Image (cartoon, rainbow, N blue to C red):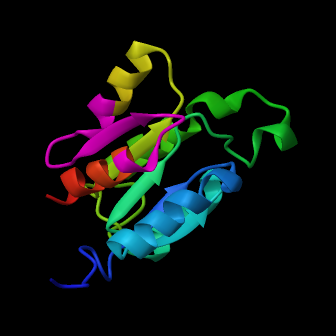
Amino acid sequence: MSDALPYQGKTALYFEDQPERVEAIKDLLHYKLGIELQMAVTLKEASKLVMERKFDLVILDIRIQADGPKEQSGTEDWARSGLHFLKELRDGKFGERTPKDVPVLVITCVVNTSDVDAILEIGNSPGARCLYIAKPTKLDPVVEAVHKLFA
């Protein structure tokens, strides 16, 4: 039996404005699957990273503050900045380092079915794959989703 990790050498960007929620998923991706995780907490930071580096997977929250954690900005523009990022990613607005068809895993607490439909419609553009997991989530669904996205 091999000890090789299934996705050794792959990288993922996790765009989440609450870094304390990322640690368990970061450890899971690294130690169980071999994926190195880079964190972004603002829209500006996530956009910069996908222009500078090639990522094999993008994980993101949809309900995220454009300029940082919700409690810091006091504005209400957080509800869709993750969706805005996903749309720009799929439209190829970030250049060629991270391809516009990179697999995307959305982990967010969206309760409106029309929002989920919008996420999946944008994320699953031609040639691209996107899966949605509702927060809070256990770790097993994350592993299953990553396997599906890399299949």
Magenta-highlighted residues: 120-140
Residue at x-position 33% and y-position 22%:
117
Residue 120 in the image: state x and y as whole percent.
30, 31
Instruction: Examine the rendered structure and indicate whether residue 29 appears above or below residue 80.
Output: below
- Residue 6 versus residue 114: which sits nearer the camera? 6
Residue 53 in the image: state x and y as whole percent.
44, 76
Residue at x-position 54% and y-position 29%:
109
Residue 29 lies in the magenta-colored region:
no
| Visible residue check, residue 13 | yes
Could you tell me how many numbered marks the image carries? Answer: 0
Residue 31 in the image: state x and y as whole percent.
43, 75
- Residue 77 versus residue 95: which sits nearer the camera? 77
Instruction: Examine the rendered structure and indicate whether residue 120 appears above or below residue 29.
Output: above
Instruction: Examine the rendered structure and indicate whether residue 78 appears above or below residue 92.
Output: above
Could you say which quadrant of the image residue 134 lies in? top left
| Visible residue check, residue 91 | no
Residue 125 lies in the magenta-colored region:
yes
Instruction: Examine the rendered structure and indicate whether residue 97 appears above or below residue 61.
Output: below
Residue at x-position 61% and y-position 61%:
23
Is residue 27 rendered to the left or right of residue 148?
right
Residue at x-position 25% and y-position 84%:
3
Residue 87 in the image: state x and y as whole percent.
40, 41
The quarter of the rendered structure image containing the C terminus is bottom left
- Residue 142 versus residue 16: which sits nearer the camera? 142
The quarter of the rendered structure image containing the N terminus is bottom left
